[in-house]
Image (spheres, rainbow, N blue to C red):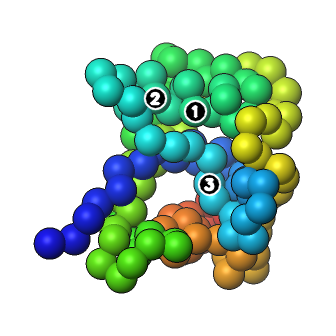
Amino acid sequence: MNKIIDKLAWIQIQDKKILSTRSRGKSVYYIPGGKREVGETDQQALSREIKEELSIELLPATIDYMGTFKAQADGYPDGTIVKMTCYTAEYEGEIIPNSEIEEVVWFTYNDKNKSSAVDKLIMDKLMENGLIQ
């Protein structure tokens, strides 16, 4: 049986580029987000994670489901799958790396190979839909 890592991600696109982050000591980039804590809804967990990582507030009324993607989890044994439930949302504040986040970048589709396996699938879908370049 495959182990599933259940995660949430915030899809933020500006000028046809997607927001991505790199944690301290890591070389792979990840779309911001994280895991929910016991009792949290997707929206509560996503808002908490994004505030911790990027110092901004997601606007709850604007949080909108975008899609769910599954792929092999980076740095885990084969068969460990990450399930990424993605949302878009508007926000207040200035995006500033916080907590374990060392770098915030805006990626085009050409930067895809710097990202995790599941993020590559997300970027493929965004490219297909003309949302990133």
For image coordinates 67% across by 29% down, the residue present is 52
Eyeballing the image, is 90 above or below 71? above
For image coordinates 82% across by 39% down, the residue present is 97
Q: Quadrant of residue 82?
A: bottom left
Q: Mark number for residue 31?
A: 3
Q: Quadrant of residue 84?
A: bottom left
Q: Mark 1 to mark 2: distance in Å?
A: 6 Å
Eyeballing the image, is 49 above or below 35? above
The residue that disc 1 covers is: 49
Dot 1 alpha-carbon crowd within 10 angstroms: few under 14, some 14 to 19, many 20 or more: many
Dot 2 alpha-carbon crowd within 10 angstroms: few under 14, some 14 to 19, many 20 or more: many
Q: Compare marks 3 and 1 and give the one earlier in the sequence.
A: 3
Kind of residue indicated by mark 1: Glu
Mark whose residue sits in front, 3 or 1: 1
Q: Quadrant of the C terminus?
A: bottom right
Q: Are marks 1 and 2 in contact (CB under 8 Å)?
A: yes
